[in-house]
Image (cartoon, rainbow, N blue to C red):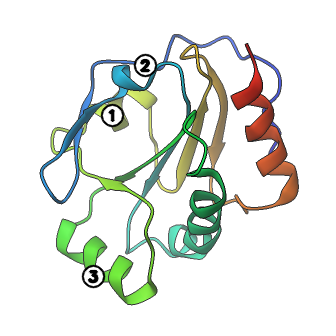
Amino acid sequence: MVFFIARQQHPPAFTDIELVDSNNNKIRLAELKGSVVFVNFWATWCEPCVDELPSIENLFRKMSVNSKFKMITILFKDSERNALSYMKINGYTFPVYLNPDSSAAKFFGVTGVPETYIIDKNGILREKVIGPAEWDTPIVVEALLKLVDEK
């Protein structure tokens, strides 16, 4: 079960790391300050990643209407072609970013996939989840909404 209510003592997670999507649109994590950010590292070759993707899609559909919530999924050691094909076949619409220099994985200390990080509006890492999770459960959605509503 994933709960992320208490603040954890980690350095701020809003950094100048640049990500790029399949349309070559660039985004920097630092630009997301003021939003709760869901960062997930995944790959198409990773069975646990593939298992959790439906719940990530459901979470994206539930939460993307909230302007103070951002979802960033980052492809890890996989090809953009594989990911885009997989997304299309499964009807997934959540955003997928590439980080060719792997600076995001290094910054977060990714040891494998899937790994997910929940960052609050102030850039504080509130949760790190190693392994798959059910991201669309009422408990998780409620916890994310509480973070979005925090002042």
Check contact, mark 1 vs mark 3: CB within 8 A.
no
Q: Choose the circle earlier in sequence order: 2 or 3.
A: 2
How far separated are the C-alphas under marks 2 and 3?
30 Å
- Residue 100 falls in image quadrant: top left
Residue 2 higher or lower than 89, as above or below? above
Label 1 with label 2: CB-CB less than 8 Å: no
Number of other residues with Cα within 10 Å of mark 2, as a class: few under 14, some 14 to 19, many 20 or more: many
What's the mark number on residue 14? 2
**Image: 73 above or below 4:** below
- What's the residue at 36%, 27% (across, down)? 29
Image x and y of residue 71, in percent: 49, 46
Q: Secondary structure at mark 2?
A: loop
User: Who is closer to the viewer here, 65 or 144?
Assistant: 65
Q: Earlier in the sequence, mark 1 or mark 2?
A: 2
- Residue 82's spot in the image, x, y percent? 25, 76
Three-letter code, disc 1: Ala
Quadrant position of residue 37? top right
Residue 19 location, quadrant? top left
Q: Nearer the viewer, residue 139 or 61?
A: 61
In this figure, which residue is indicated by the disc labeled 3?
85
User: Disc 3 residue type?
Assistant: Ser
Question: Can you see residue 76?
Answer: yes
Camera-near label (1 vs 3) is 3
> Is residue 75 toward the left or the right of residue 41 in the image?
left
Amino acid at the residue labelled 2: Phe
Left or right of 111 in this view: 25:
left
Q: Does the residue at mark 2 contact the one at mark 3 (Cβ under 8 Å)?
A: no
- The mark closer to the camera, 1 or 2, is 2
* Residue 104 tag number: 1
Residue at 38 percent of width and 65 percent of height: 43
